[in-house]
Amino acid sequence: MPRYNLFVLPGDGIGPEVMAEVEKIAAWFTREGIVQFEIDKGLVGGAAYDAHKTAISDADMARAQAADAVLLAAVGGPKWDGVPYEVRPEAGLLRLRKDMNLFANLRPAICYPALADASSLKRELVDGLDLMIVRELTGGVYFGEPKQIIDLGNGQRRGIDTQVYDTYEIERIGRIAFELARKRRNKVTSSDKRNVMKSGVLWNEVITALHAREYKDVELEHQLADALGMQLVRRPKQFDVIVTDNLFGDMLSDVAAMLTGSLGMLPSASLGEKNAKGETRKALYEPVHGSAPDIAGKGIANPIAMIGSFGMVLRYSFNLGVLADRIEKAISDVLEKGLRTADIAGGATKILSTSQMGDAILARLQAVV
Ligand code: NAD
């Protein structure tokens, strides 16, 4: 039986509620002898501040670095609005991303047929949608120097951000995209603004050369980022894997997210370099949603994004794609049966609590595994 160490950070608000549903599923896998999960739990965000006056302790950071994968729920909430800036809840998340050097953000946008009517687009455009946005996360205009506001001395000020990418940064994100595509529908769309930006010219050249050198078997196309934004809402099913920089990826992944209808449904992964043995990567998995303080403690949060994030752990960190497929199938079947949490209720008559939804998915999983 494969054995993996999973470091779990439930965080704040609805975090512990949705994480509990993942723990149920992981415990079942272990009980059945399918995979042995050794789950280690830590504190992040407001929960870490309350315990240690920091957004994540050095000890938990070291455990995150040592784990086979890290699974985080969400951080933040009004309770910590007044805490010092360096130890605000989000600082825990930022430290995890920075110290683990997580340079690739993977955001799948999957539209389950049963929820296609929740999308702002017409059903026929999104029904069965399954695309993946790969966003570069540690470079580009959010981090480039100089980054400042200078006083021009004539009553004017100048704001400066610098878009900067080196070859190695483009190559490593490109590799992630091409390798993902090989496990999916074998197509990569690379996006930049080479018509107006030098960094876009380099991005385009590096991706094209990498493709010719190592990934000729994958179909590659290039789309300018503005045109791609338009295509995402016009004909989103043309895409398989989209790879783009930090800024464009930030915007395009939010657009893609809304194609699927609900925040409570969206998982994500952030990947770093391969470890010394070259077998696994540093990785952090988390739902796209936040800590939802407005519904925390009520037991009504949708656990599907959290469970989907666990599915991504299985697929991308543990190479257990078959089990990830079964989790996705169990989610799809449960939705198909009309079972809903409040956020995706639509016209459903019976609304499930967080734990009832977790139980329904687990019961379906038990039937298909
Ligand atoms: P949010 O994602 O927490 O909530 C937005 C809306 O979506 C709310 O109405 C909420 O009830 C609903 N929602 C979110 N997840 C849901 C789920 N699983 N099931 C049902 N409904 C769900 O975003 P926000 O309100 O802007 O932020 C709340 C707090 O979360 C803030 O402190 C913010 O800083 C933090 N936040 C954290 C992360 C993270 O941990 N990665 C991401 C975004 C926001």
Image (cartoon, rainbow, N blue to C red):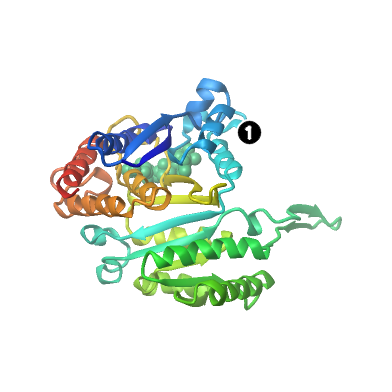
Q: Residue at image x 46%, y 29%?
A: 42
Q: Where is residue 363 in the image (x, y as percent from the top left)?
A: 17, 42
Residue 63 falls left or right of residue 344: right
Q: How many marks?
A: 1
* Callout 1 amino acid: Glu
Q: Residues within 10 Å of mark 1 (few under 14, many from 20)?
A: few
Front position in the image: 67 or 289: 67
Q: Residue at image x 37%, y 74%?
A: 238
Q: Residue at image x 35%, y 36%?
A: 37
Q: Where is residue 41 in the image (x, y as percent from the top left)?
A: 43, 29
Q: In which quarter of the image is residue 23?
A: top left
Residue 308 falls left or right of residue 165: left
Q: Disc 1 marks which residue?
A: 86
Residue 125 falls left or right of residue 222: left
Q: Position of residue 141 (x, y in %)?
A: 65, 59
361 in relation to 80, above or below? below
Q: Can residue 270 be seen in this view?
A: yes
